[in-house]
Image (spheres, rainbow, N blue to C red):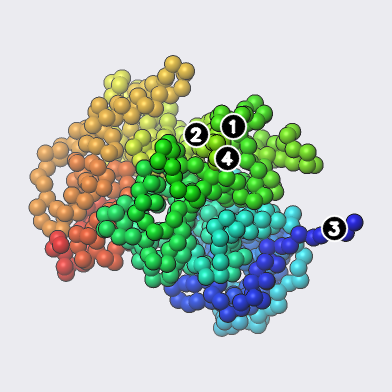
Amino acid sequence: MTTVEEPDVLDLWDRRVREHPDAAALVTPHQVMTYRSVDRLTDAWAGSLATRGAGPGRLVGLAFPDPGRTVLGMVAALKAGAGFTVLDDRLPAAARDSLVRRTQAAVWLGDGAHAPATAYVPAGPADTGGRTADAGGSTLPLPRPPRAAVGSDVAYVLFTSGSTGQPKGTVIERDSLRRFAVAVAERLELAAEDRWLQVCSLGFDVLIEEVFPALVSGAAVVCRADTQALDAEELHTTMARTGTTVVELSTQYWLEYARWLDGHGLTTPAELRLVVVGGERMDPRPYREWQARQPARLAHVYGLTECTVSSTMYTGLLPADAEEVPLGTPLRDVEVSVRRDGRPVPQGESGEIHIGGPLLARGFLGDETATARRFVPDPLSAAPGARVYTTGDLGRIDADGNLIFLGRLDDQVKVRGHRLEPARVERALCENPAVDQAVVFPDPRTGTALWAFTVPADPRLAPLPGEVVRLTGAERDALVAPLAAHLPDWAVPRVLYRVSVLPKNPHGKIDKRRLSDWTSAAGAGVPGQLPDTANGPDRDRPEPRDEPLSTVVDLFREVLDAPAIGPDDDFFEHGGQSLLAMRLLARLRESFPAAAGLRASTLLRCPTPRLLAGALPVAETTRS
């Protein structure tokens, strides 16, 4: 019997190049690249990579400061037969150095400030100036290497947080990537006319979903000029300007965009037909409101990095009596089951969500123990070597066959779409000799920022039992700075408290609800009033009356829901994070025409009302 060889993801790419070479493949603020031009450039890049050791079983590291060239590097690495990994430029230096060491990439492409010293940018048909000369000093483009990779070779390695104290590198094979891209394109009905806007951070696995389903469909990937996050207004105008038809947003990002649309009485841009949303539990109310008001339809997705991004999708109209937004039904080549003690449960009953099928990752890079623990043999499958991934998520299958999310089996949480083991942050806090114990969890109201409660090593510094002290200034900085040097921004607690003891519930677990109640009783929480101990001697300071400072202070208080915020209080010390920064910038633009050009980076440089007011151009700072 003749064995039919499965196509490679590049076979699908080559088909699109042949079918419509002059169609747009990559859209950036500076140029539109056709399938033919992307093909020629990535052929040349692949040839250069091959001369430097890239090939099957090896990795190419990507460290560009812009998404467009990152996409080119991904395609080029696959053409060289290698896999790729992407270095997020927003990671702290220590975390970046660790990932560079662990990946042991054969070669690094890039010219960002975060790139390793050995990184370079290959020459290509449109770049023969000599600055980016290939191996051997030649500036002539090299030919695409002969096809050598097979479906079981690595396609990419991306990192996800884990309980071991360091991120886990998930190894995805080429066959899994191909199957995934085809399945998503099929479910979302992608066509050559589509344009998918790339918005997620480059180290996040959603990047894969933003790129490859579009490219295997003959659609275009639309890229930003840089990796800075777009606030709601920038997102809206970018989609309208570029004719975006598909975009994927984290749950909290989507909520922020929906709130902005409602506040301005707007609907989604005319060309936008689909908004893919996922990463966290979805509340039914805003989902129904969107479906009633907005022309762009929704696709609710669920998946994990270890299972090649998304595994299920829900695209229907939410019934009026639904208490949860379903996670949907499995994509092609994905097997989803709900099990208890290793056995499937009857329909409608709860259990742990298990995912199987050929989209599963090979495992975790260099961590056989973790791989064996989460990727287990599937006793229910007759297929040789069949495995299943134990997600740790609770769920059930409803009468319509949709997967319903019910929570977590363990303490893992999601913060702005990222999975996090709080123990990782808690251990880092306890490395400070001044901290005896610590607990970390998302703020109860929004879930978008982390709170940390610490018990001091010196009992003399502990408040009375049942009381909390909000840490500010130098005390807060002493705990946060070491974390910020090694953890991504979303994993660093924004609000820190000191308590005398971590209360326990009847089951012996830390009672997080009681800790939250303590902050409310003391007026120490976010949102809410800061305690007098945090405000110190300036608690009776006069309200600012000069403009624009007075209005900026009011907007800080509104967005952070913290009435005691003063002119010199730090946005990020009082619970601010990227999504709230988007909201603040949107409100500033409504109040001041001069704020139109402000971006999130301005708030990072000017995190207090006084500094931010000073950053506004002198002209036109009267409140509109």
Residue 329 in sight: yes
Q: Decide: is 620 above or below 359.
A: below
Left-right relation of 129 to 538: right
Q: CA distance from mark 4 to mark 2?
A: 15 Å
Q: CA distance from mark 3 to mark 4?
A: 34 Å
- Circle 2 is placed at which residue position? 406
Q: Residues within 10 Å of mark 2 (few under 14, many from 20)?
A: some
Q: Decide: is 183 above or below 408.
A: below
- Circle 1 is placed at which residue position? 347
Left-right relation of 309 to 523: right
- Going from the N terminus, do you reach mark 3 or mark 4 first? 3
* Mark in the foreground, 4 or 2: 4
**Quarter of image, res 497:** top left
Left-right relation of 99 to 554: right
Q: Secondary structure at mark 3?
A: loop
- Going from the N terminus, do you reach mark 3 or mark 1 first? 3
> Which quadrant holds the C terminus?
bottom left
Q: CA distance from mark 2 to mark 3?
A: 43 Å
* Mark in the foreground, 2 or 1: 1
Q: Amino acid at mark 4?
A: Gly
- Residue 361, x across and y down, in percent: 66, 48
- Going from the N terminus, do you reach mark 4 or mark 2 first? 4
- Circle 4 is placed at which residue position? 401
- Going from the N terminus, do you reach mark 2 or mark 1 first? 1
Q: Secondary structure at mark 4?
A: loop
- Residue 417, x across and y down, in percent: 46, 46
- Residue 11, x across and y down, in percent: 70, 67
Q: Are the residues tagged 4 and 2 within 8 Å (C-beta)?
A: no
Q: Secondary structure at mark 2?
A: strand
